[in-house]
Image (tube, rainbow, N blue to C red):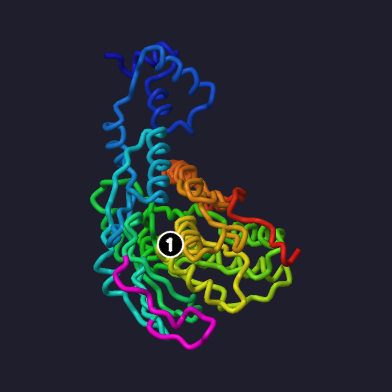
Amino acid sequence: MVTRNDVAKKACVSGATVSRVFNNPQSVSQATRDKVLKAAKELNYHPNVIASNFTKGISGNIGVVVPKIPNIRVFSVYYFAELLNGIAESLSEQGYNLVLFYHDVSNILNKSTVSSGNTKVSPYGNTEVLAGNTKDSPENIKTPPGNTDSSLGSTSSFQISNSNKSFIFSGGDYSRYFTGGKVDGCILLGTYYNDPELLKLRNYGCKFCLINNYIKDTDINFIDVDNIKGSINAVNYLVSLGHKNIAFLNGPDYFINSVDRLKGYKIALESNGIPFNKSLVLEGNYGRKSGYYAAKKILEFKNRPTAVFVANDRMAVGLIQGLTEASIKVPEDISVLGYDDSDIATLITPPLTTMHVSFYELGKKCATEFIRYITNNENVFNIFIEPELVVRKSTTINIVNR
C-alpha cells in the first residue's frame, strides 16, 4: 500500500508537505503542489479522505434541502430536477457527497393560509378568489375547486394579482439539518421571499446558500437569476414587435422571482412610454392549469391584449392550450412569451419564445461557489445570472400597431 512517505520520497519533500498539499493546499506553493500531485498520481496514491475529514472536523457532505410540497412530485418537475443534477455534478467533481433532506411544508402550508382583502391565499397554489368588483377584471370569477394539474401535480388556481398583500410565508425550522455534524453546510431550494427563518439560520452561524432566492441587504449566500433584467428584455422584445397592450401572467408573490419579474415588467413599460395597467397583471401558481384558466380571463377583457408575457413556460403552455381551444391563434391573434426555456418549450405548438435559464448551470455554479466559501473561508457570494431571449414561433409582429 502506497503511503504518504512514499509520495514524499518521490517528490523530494517532507511528509508534512504532502499532508499540506492534500489538506491545506493554499499554504503550499503552486510548484510544490504540482510536484507532489505528480508523484501521487504516478504512485496511484489516494489519501484517506474519511480520516482526514475527521481530523479537520468536517463530514465531506453537503445537504440539499428540497421542499416536500402537497400534490407536487418535486423530483419530476423540470426546475428541481435540473437544479439537483447541476448541484450533484459539481459536488461530485469536488469530492463531496450530496445528502438530500426532504423538508415537509404541508403542516406549515395548512397553518399559514391567510386572508388578505378579498382573496384567500395559501402557498403553492391553494388559492381561491372569493369576490370581485369590476367588469373587465377576472377578479369576479371563482377558481373551479379541486382541479389538479397531473403534469405537475399542483392544485390549479388563478387570481388577479393583489399588490396589497402584507403577509410573509415561512418555510419553518431549517436548523435541524445543521445539527449532529451530518453536513458541512446546506443548499436550500424552494424557500420563500423574506422568510424570517433564513435570518435565524444566519444568526445561528449556519453555513448555507440560497438558490433562486435572495434577501436584500444581508450577508447571506445566494445565486439567482436576474429576473428584473430578464423581464425587461422580454417586454422590450414584445414592444419591438409593435405590442403595447401587453398582459403579464405572474406567479405567487411569496417568491422573489415573481416579485422581481413584476418589477421588470413595470420598468420596461415605463421606459417604453406605456402606462402600467394593474388589471393586465394576473396571478397563477406556476402550474399549467393556472395558465389554462388565465386564457379565459384574458379573452374577457374589452380591450384584449395583443401579447402576454408569462412568468414560466408551464403556465405559458397552459395559456396557449386555453387560447387554442377558444379558437384564438398564437401568435397571429395573441403573442405569448414564456420564461425558463424548459423542456416543454419546444414540444408545444407553436414552439415557445421564452427567456432561457440554465437551471443545471445555476445549480452547478451554486455548489462550486458554496464549496469555495466553506473550505477557504471566503467572503459571502451574491451572484445573479442573466437569462437570454430565445425566439421561436409563439411571438410575431403586431400588425395593427405597425
Few, some or many C-alpha atoms within 10 Å of disc 1 (few <14, some 14-19, many ≥20)? many
Q: Can residue 377 be seen in the rendering of this structure?
A: no
Outermost residue on the bottom side: it is 133
Whether residue 356 is visible to the viewer of this picture, yes or no, is yes
Does 259 lie within the magenta span? no
The segment highlighted magenta reads 130-147
Q: Residue at x 41, y 11 (%)?
A: 10
Q: Is residue 316 left or right of residue 168?
A: right
Judged left or right of residue 225, residue 286 is left
Tag 1 secondary structure: loop
Residue projecting furthest to the right = 402
Q: Nearer the viewer, residue 397 or 363?
A: 397
Q: Amino acid at mark 1?
A: Tyr
Q: Is residue 294 above or below residue 208?
A: below
> Looking at the picture, how far across and down is residue 342, in whole percent?
47, 49
Q: Residue at x 48, y 50 (%)?
A: 348
Closest to the observer, 171 or 249: 249
Secondary structure mostly seen in magenta is: loop
Image quarter (top left, top right, bottom left or bottom right) of the N terminus:
top left
Residue ID at (57%, 64%): 308
Q: Position of residue 55 (x, y in %)?
A: 29, 36
The front one of 6 and 167 is: 167
Residue indicated by mark 1: 286
